[in-house]
Amino acid sequence: MSVNLLETVIKNLGYKALHKVDPNEQEVKLFDSLSADEKLYQAAVPATLTAFSLFAVTGKGYEKIMNSVLKEQHPDIFGGKQQEMAEKIAQYSGATADKAKEVMSSVAQEAMRIVQNEKDKGVSMDKIKNNMDDHRQTILQYLPASLQLGELLDDGSMDDRTHKMEGPMSNLAHMFEKKLPGGEKPPEKKA
């Protein structure tokens, strides 16, 4: 996949750029200066894309994404936990859970459209799937830890602060983590 999923979704939906979380604090440093909409997008976009990438790396989940008709409701990328995620996002941002679900749905729909466009351009399904897994690291750098989505989505590594670090040594460590046998990958889930 030749596009950065996070950046492309933000741009296509017309949202302001998100802020990376501080790896030490695990929260956005300028949180109090963000508008209500910015707080909502700061939580909803990476939360939805994290759920989307976890769903997409499963065989059946990936097939459902690729075979969905965009005008139909997106497949349940949230594993039946969309309401719980929306409530956590609402609590973080001060928005209503319904507004959070609306943004989550828009983000999921746009992510599906982007991935399906890549397939239509001739990018192999395996390459898209691998790149989705690679994008997970970038997405986690924007995910506020206070959402505690790792517990909700059964992936404790999500809330681990080492996934939110960057720099030459961290990037090298993440590369080895993915390539070595037993390296950490999101757990394979049944879709």
Image (spheres, rainbow, N blue to C red):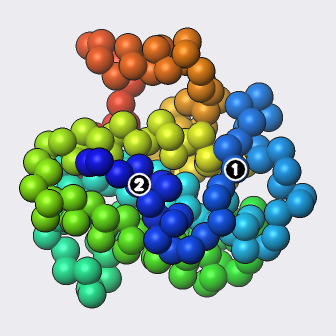
Tell me where residue 47 appears, x and y as whole percent: 54, 57
Tell me where residue 181 appears, x and y as whole percent: 26, 13
**Disc 2 marks which amino acid?**
Leu
Q: Give the quarter of the figure containing the C terminus.
A: bottom left
Q: Could you tell me which residue is drawn at 77 percent across and 47 percent down? A: 28
Which comes sooner in the sequence, label 1 or label 2? 2
Q: In the displayed structure, would residue 57 be above or below residue 48?
A: above
Residue on which the image places disc 2? 5
Q: Could you tell me which residue is drawn at 18 percent across and 42 percent down? A: 127
Tell me where residue 179 appears, x and y as whole percent: 29, 17
Which element type, helix, strand or loop, lies under badge 2?
helix
**Left or right of 62: which side holds 124?**
left
Res. 181 mark = none
Q: In the displayed structure, would residue 56 be above or below residue 168?
A: below
Residue 68 lies in quadrant: bottom left
The answer to whether the residues at label 1 and label 2 have Cβ atoms under 8 Å apart is: no
Residue on which the image places disc 1? 19
Q: In the displayed structure, would residue 153 be above or below residue 169?
A: below
